[in-house]
Amino acid sequence: MECKTERMFGNEGDLERNVTFEQIEVSNNIMLNNQNELCDKENLNTSSEIANKICKDLNKAQENFIAPVDEEFLADDTLDKTIWEDINKAKESGAFIPTKYLTLIHGSETTTKIFAKLVVRNGNRGEPVIVLAYTDGGVSPELEISKAELMRISFGNYGVKENGFDKKDVAYASTLIKKIGDRILPYWEFDIGMTLMELLKLLSGKLSVLKIDRGEELDVKMVYSFIYKYVQRVKSHPAKCYIIRRGFYALISEDILEVASNMNSKVPTIIKMLKQNNLLHLQDSSVGNQCEVKGVGSCYCIKMLAKYQENEVQDFSGNAFDQL
């Protein structure tokens, strides 16, 4: 029986664990590719006859389901070794570390570096996330350590028993630290030169200076600004005479879709943000998120800022498209 350690990475909850593998005499080391040679027979510790049959069956299966490639339409597939080497050098220098929004909180030029940021999800104020950047140019996934965890660990004196701290709080802090360790330590490197406890204290002290990554979380100012700029751009076009009404902008589906495209976002995300901030006008008779606007039909009715109403009112009566 041969035992070896396999480091298993995936979701944050994955742990580094010891996995015992039974050494099997027949190794099914079958190498598949899209060329004629589907098997490396020398790696099959079995008879030549069985190996040939396996390869023949695999070839047949692939031929039945995969269309042949016409090489005439392909460029030369020779690897540019110079480019390959340059990319590797760039990676090792840290060129591909995703530093946007990240703040360096620990590390040096010759060690693994620890970056951190706050990630906004579902309207929260941002949860701390760390990213480890290794000396070979690789990076860890984003590893979250929530504010709640940091606060409760602090309340429990980081799991250290001392007078003045409630024993239950201390025990709970110790449990939380172990859970965080399960998430973080699979990505840890010994050249970091600090303990997990020290990292938690460091991260707690840096929260106020971390940058905020909103990801797909939209800011209402940005959403409204894009809508306003879109209206100003199209309002003079004969086909858009309907778009400015008394107290609101009437956007049909194609309008809101173009706004979403300009923002590199999605219509449901934008509508949700407008509703949350009371900027979407709805009536009791509204169907979904749209109102029926006279002469136009179903529209997303975006409330207008009072300051702009006097200068922007057009308010065509009847059929807006009669103005074309």
Image: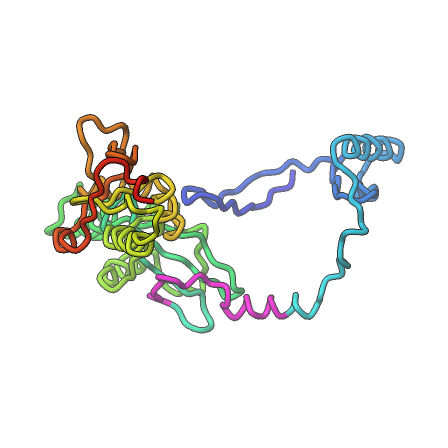
Say which quarter of the image contains residue 204.
bottom left
Task: Give how far across and how far down residue 307 sits, in percent.
Answer: 13, 55
Q: Is residue 194 above or below residue 263?
A: below
List the single residue furthest toward the top. 285
In this view of the protein, can residue 68 be seen by the observer? Answer: yes
List the single residue furthest toward the right. 49
Task: Give how far across and how far down residue 320 sits, in percent.
Answer: 28, 40
Task: Give how far across and how far down residue 303 sits, in percent.
Answer: 19, 44
- Horizontally, is 239 left or right of 97 in the view? left
Q: Is residue 136 above or below residue 171?
A: below
Q: Is residue 101 magenta?
A: yes
- Horizontally, is 189 left or right of 68 in the view? left
Bounds of the magenta segment: 86-106
Q: Is residue 303 magenta?
A: no
Q: Is residue 32 above or below residue 307?
A: above
Task: Give how far across and how far down residue 221 sits, in percent.
Answer: 23, 54
Q: If the image is split into quadrants, where does the N terminus sit? A: top right
